[in-house]
Structure formats: C-alpha cells, structure tokens
Amino acid sequence: MEEELKCPVCGSLFKDPILLPCSHNVCLACARNITVQTPDGETPVQSRASGSSDYDYLDMDKMSLYSETDSGYGSYTPCQLKSPNGVRVFPPATHPRHCSLTCPLCHRSVSLDERGLRGFPRNRLLEAIVTRYQQNRRASAASSSSAVKCQLCDRNPVDAAVMCEQCDVYYCNACQQRCHPSRGPLAKHRLVPPPNQAAGGGAASGGGGAQQPPATARKPATCVDHEAENFSMYCYSCKIPVCMKCLEEGKHAKHDVKTLAMMWKQHKCQISQALNGVSDKAKDAKEFLVQLKNMLQQIQENGVEFEACLVAQCDSLIEALTRQKAKLLTKVTKEKEYKLKVVRDQITHCTMKLRQTTGMMEYCLEVLKENDPSGFLQISDALIKRVTSSQDQWVKGALEPKVGPEFDLTLNTDSLLQTILQLDFCQGKVEPGPAVPAAPLLQLEKCCTRNNSATLAWRVTAPPASPIEGYILELDDGNGGQYREVYVGKETVCTVDGLHFNSSYNARVKAYNAIGVGPYSKTVVLKTSDVAWFSFDPTTAHRDIVLSNENQTVTCSSYDDRVVLGTAAFSKGIHYWEVSIDRYDNHPDPAFGVARINTMKDMMLGKDDKAWAMYVDNNRSWFMHNNSHTNRAEGGITKGSTVGILLDLTKHTLTFYINKEQHGPTAFENLDGVFVPAVSLNRNVQVTLVTGLEVPKNTKQ
C-alpha cells in the first residue's frame, strides 16, 4: 500500500495531492516543477481512447535524461533539474495561460487555464489516507520488535540467521539451506549476519510483528575470492573489477588491467557522450513530430485539391462523351433521312411508271377489241414497240428496294470500354532528365476501319527530355496471335491496307529516341468489315479499259480481251460479289474470277497461271486456269444477266452463279495467297460491279 501512496515525481508520500483529469495524483509542489510553457496556440496531444499514448514534443523532451559527471561532459537538454524519483522538472512557467502539465504515469498532457494549478481539485480523501497511514506507521514502529525475521517462512516466521548481500534477503537456517545453498551459482554470494546481530543484539522486544532493521550505509564492495581486500583495479579483458591479491596471484597477468578510478571516470565519460547523441536524436525527433503535424494539414489540403481535380477530369470525359453522343445521333438522323428520301423517291418513281403502264395496258385492251384488221394493223407495229419499251423499263432491280430498313452503322465501344475500365493513376513521378519517351496515347476518335484497311492516329502524352525520333506501330494477325511491325516512321497517322475481312486486330504503338525505346501504348481493337466493298482499280487496269459510274462500270475500247482488277485483296475467308451485264453484243466471251496482282492484262482472264476464272458466252461456260479449260456447263448470259463469284479461301474453291444458277464449285490446289477480283472483256460487253453482298445460303457443296 505504501507504493500507492507515493508521488510519482518526488517518490515521497503525497503532500497536498491534486487530482489530474487522467485520474492520477501528484503533489502540488511537484506539479509546479513539471509544468512547462508551450508556444502560443499549441495544443498538447491527448492520448487515444485505446490507452496508447501519443508522445508530443514535451514527452520526447522529458525522455532526454540529464547526466553530469566529473569528466566535464554533460548531455544537452533545455533543463538540467531532476526530481529524486528521476522525473524531469522545469523552471517555473511565467505565463500559466500557455502552460501544460504532463502526467508522469500515463504521459497525457493537459493545458492550464488562467487559474493555473488551482484549477485542479485537491484530493482530500487521499490526503486523509496518507495522514492516517503515517500515524499507524509511527504507532507500529513504537510497539514493534527490533528483531529481524526470516522473509521466506510461510507461517510464524523465526528470527533470521543470515542475510545475502547480493540477494538482499534475510534467511533462517532452514530456509537458507533449502532456498540459498552455498553451492553452484550461489556459492559466490556473501552471507553475513543480520544487522541487529552484527551490532551485538537487537533492541528490547515489544509485542507484535516483525520490524525491518534500519537502513545502514553499504560497505565498500570486497573481492569474492579475497574477502579482506577491496576492489582497486579493473580487468579490461575480463570486464570485472579485481583486487591487488588477484593481481599478485597472477590470475590476470597477461590481461589489460587499469585502475578502478580511471575506468570509472572513463565509462562515465562514455555514457555522458552517448547521452549527448541521444539528446540530439530527441531534438531531431521533436522537430520531426512538428514536421509530421504540418504534413497532416498538407495532406488534408492536397487531398481536397486532388479530389476536385479528379472530379473535373471525369466531368470533362463525361462532357466529351455527351458531345460525341450528340454527333453520333446526328449521323443516325442523317442516315434515317437519307433512307426515307430514297424510299419516297422510289415510291414516287414506281407510282408514275405504274400509272403509265396501267394506262398503256388499258389502251391495248381497247385496241384488242377492234375487229377491223386493217385498222388494227395500222397501229399494231407502233403499239408492239411501245409495249416492248414499256417492258424494258422494268429491268432487273427496278422492283427491288434501293435501301434496306436496317442501318449499316455499327458503334464499336469495346476498346473505349476497355480503356475506361483500365483508367487508373500512374504511381510515382518521373524525375526530369534523359529518358525514353512515354507511351503514346492512341486517339480513338481518329482510329477507324474501312473495308480491309485500318487507320490509326496517336499523340505524345508528355514531351520527353530527348526529342522523339520515330514511332513503331504493331498489329497482330487478326486471330490474337503475335504482333508484327507494320509501320516505322515519324508520322503520327498511319493507314494499313490488305487486312483480312471480318477480323478483329489488336494495335499498339511505341516511340523511340536516342536513349532507347519507350513502353507500348494501350491496345486498341479494330474490326474490319464483314463483307467487301470495292470497285474497279483504274491504276492497275489495261490502258484500253474504260471506267465510269465511280469505277463501278467497265467496258473496253478494243475488240481484244483486256483485264481490269478490283481494289480489294483477299487472303482468307469467304467472299461473294456480282457483276451485272449492261451490254452484250455479237456474243463475246467475257471472263470473271480472281487473279494475282501481276496477272497478264492483255489477254483473256485465266490464260496465264496467275488467274482463275470462268468465261461464258450466250450458251455455255467453262472454268479456265493456265489456259486449261474444264467443267463445261450449259447456260449462258444475255443483256441483263447477273454473274456471281464466290471465293472460298478456306476450301480453295471458286463457285459461279449465272442468274442465280450455281456452277461449281471447282477446287484449285494452288488457290492460296492473296487474290483480287478480276474481269476480262472487250468493247462488245459492259458490266457493272455490285459488292457488299452476303454469301448465298443455298450453295451446293
């Protein structure tokens, strides 16, 4: 109980105790000693509810110990006073309003108001308990016996016989033999008689309990091996003090032995110097805590600013998406209006022609009722020509809609959605200096596909310290395979031709400079057209070829067969297109099929080994390759006929359709590689190309 009644600052029984907010007590005089002045506006850090203490700079300062010896060295601390209990004390505070007091037990700090220490309540109950305890102790001392009792006896302790100086415990003979035998590690402990026996007996016995002997001054330590000798030297090798007898016996003959006073002073100097370093660290820790507190405020401010910046960036993305949505809706509206106009014009045109045809039919019916042969024959020739002409107006396609109800617009959002899902922060900041270029940013709004071509555009996100020398664009094979380089140069826009139809390509780009090659950009997915849209190519056609109708219609200025190629190239997949016969005079033999880009242009298609074709007249058709004729079939062409060409590069076959009647398929072993559509014809034939068609579903295998 006595320890509970002692002040944690001075170590003595409480005198005028005051109660702190943390429920601990301290003497009023000691409270004045540990009160410190704080800077204006500084609020001491309070301990958390969990019970762990947050040490502020006062706590850290309080942990800096003061030590000064006769070596002349002392630790650097703001205050050099220390209480008997080891707690730092400070000079009296001059301004109580800016003072704080830290509890020496839980280290919780509290600020003082204008009343100073008078603001804390006096613990009258504790003061009364201390007074009553002092009275009882004095009464017990007056009536107790001075005989020293054994401290290890469980019941009815007997008088002590010996005391161990090292253990500082009193033993009776039985307890000493049982608990402290003179052997093993305890053999070197020194057992001496109790103080009352050493002084010639105790005081007169009174009543009651045992009384501990009064404290006596500790004798100088003596050598364990030579009890009569005091320690006077220090063995530096063994790290123990020794006496002169030990040195005379030669136990430490070859050891480094120094005087005890010199080593005592030297070690005090070392401890004092070490404390100087600890004091400097404590000072640095105090400054570091202030820095951390300032950082808390900076983090709060920067967090609010960064959140606002992030919201603004996301809002700008949403705004850009909203603007793009409006543009896309405008395109859909224009497409809808175009389709409506085409259908309305076709309705008007068809209605007019129907009225003309109906009127002519009614007139012909009336003429047929005429019974006068001579009168009938006078107008019959003109009427027959008129009926035939009217019939010719209803050519193939006149009763077919020019547009379909479906919208041929596909919005590919996969790459954009993938980019949005990958939107994240870039960790770390790149220090300025020579470095490889950053990853370029693909501009999705400028990336597009047309037929089997892809156009990509990109830009630099951050200018590097070294100028960019060029870019490397890579595409995979359209099946998720390995990437290959398709462009190396300084331009930031590139169009790649000759891709596969109905395929999805992954594209990426990276930049390079004198330092090296930078990282890849994010991957963008580009999908080529499902079906081929193309025309005849005037750049590769024979000079006798005549093109019109935006290079969709072709004829020839020569009576000899001349070849014209298409603008599309096929290397895999299944493709279908048609050719309509606009003019067919004198029964020529036009040829239709596919060819290599370097096929002969001044002879019929299929006569060399670089073309595969079907040539046809008004009665029959033949497959031809390398001037070899095979698979003759009945059925020819006339004006208004349609020839369909089906190229299957999976099965390496060609199939033809004459007025929807299938011819083939015919397999060719060497039908592999890259092919372009081709036609050969002379001046007696004019054909028009029709593309963007689906593969016929009734194809016979």
Image (cartoon, grey):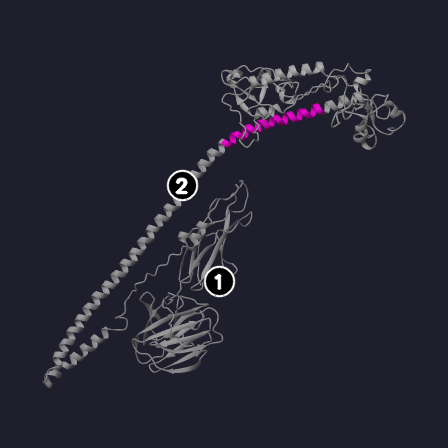
Left or right, 388 with respect to 4, comes to left
Is residue 369 magenta-colored?
no
Q: Is residue 246 visible?
A: yes
Location of residue 215 (image quadrant): top right
| Relative height, residue 688 to residue 334 (above, below) | below
Left or right, 154 with respect to 531, comes to right
| Relative height, residue 401 to residue 219 (above, below) | below
Q: Is residue 605 visible?
A: no
Q: Residue at x 12, y 83 (%)?
A: 376
Q: SS at mark 2?
A: helix
- Residue 403: percent from the left, percent from the top? 29, 64
Q: Residue at x 48, y 71 (%)?
A: 672
Q: Which mark is residue 479?
A: 1
Q: CA distance from mark 2 to mark 1?
A: 39 Å
Which amino acid, by three-letter code, is at mark 1? Asn
Work out whether residue 553 or residue 338 is closer to the camera in this orientation and state it. 338
- Residue 543: percent from the left, percent from the top? 37, 70
- Residue 65: percent from the left, percent from the top? 65, 23
For the magenta stretch, what is the residue range?
Answer: 271-296
Sequence order check: which comes first, mark 2 or mark 1?
2
- Residue 493: percent from the left, percent from the top? 43, 53
| Relative height, residue 530 to residue 52 (above, below) | below
Is residue 286 magenta-colored?
yes
The residue that label 2 is drawn on is 312
